[in-house]
Image (cartoon, grey):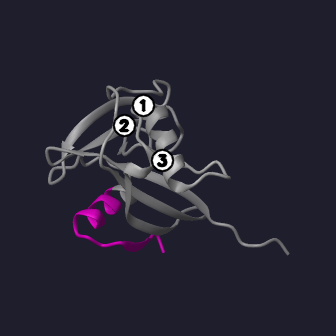
């Protein structure tokens, strides 16, 4: 019998002037047209902070040192499979924010934390709300 496995993912909550950086998914086959944060799966044999640094560079073209991340929320989520999502805030970043994967994203913009767009990936919106309310752990989709 095969052991049960969870799929881990990381999500970047980048804040500036009480706004959060969001990207609109495009041509991915999942939640296209909806906003999310820079995010991705761990590739294996990498820490959550290393994966987040890699994804930030790939998706938003910014360099973030792994030591500059803080895990602010963990979500155990049920979708088509069970997942664990780590939401991280970055204290600093280097580089000019721009779309790094033009074939998967068609907008990269700052949105007020108290005025998130209606068209958001639902569990990402919930993760941001949990962060705002200082809730470290949640469950979604059960």
x%, y% of residue 51? 54, 47
Q: Earlier in the sequence, mark 3 or mark 1?
A: 3
Q: Earlier in the sequence, mark 1 or mark 2?
A: 2
Which residue: 37% across, 45% down?
37
Q: Residues within 10 Å of mark 2 (few under 14, many from 20)?
A: many
Quadrant where the N terminus is found in the figure: bottom right
Real-space CA distance between mark 3 and mark 1, rounded to the nearest whole angstrom = 17 Å
**Secondary element at tag 1:** strand
Give the residue number, with chain letter if any, for mark 2: 24
Give the residue number, with chain letter if any, for mark 3: 52
Real-space CA distance between mark 2 and mark 3, rounded to the nearest whole angstrom = 18 Å
* Residue 25 position by quadrant: top left
Magenta span covers which residues?
125-142
Q: Earlier in the sequence, mark 2 or mark 3?
A: 2
Which residue: 51% across, 44% down?
30
Real-space CA distance between mark 1 and mark 2, rounded to the nearest whole angstrom = 6 Å
């Amino acid at each position: 019998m095969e052991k049960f496995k969870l799929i881990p993912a990381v999500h970047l909550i980048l804040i500036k002037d009480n706004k959060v950086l969001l990207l609109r998914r495009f041509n991915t086959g999942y939640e296209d047209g909806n906003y999310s944060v820079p995010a991705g799966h761990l590739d294996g044999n990498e820490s959550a902070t290393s994966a987040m640094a890699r994804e930030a560079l790939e998706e938003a073209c910014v360099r973030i040192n792994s030591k500059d991340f803080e895990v602010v929320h963990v979500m155990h989520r049920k979708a088509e499979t069970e997942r664990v999502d780590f939401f991280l805030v970055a204290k600093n970043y280097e580089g000019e924010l721009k779309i790094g994967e033009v074939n998967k994203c068609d907008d990269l913009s700052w949105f007020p934390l108290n005025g998130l767009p209606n068209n958001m990936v639902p569990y990402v919106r919930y993760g941001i709300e949990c962060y705002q309310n200082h809730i470290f752990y949640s469950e979604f989709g059960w």
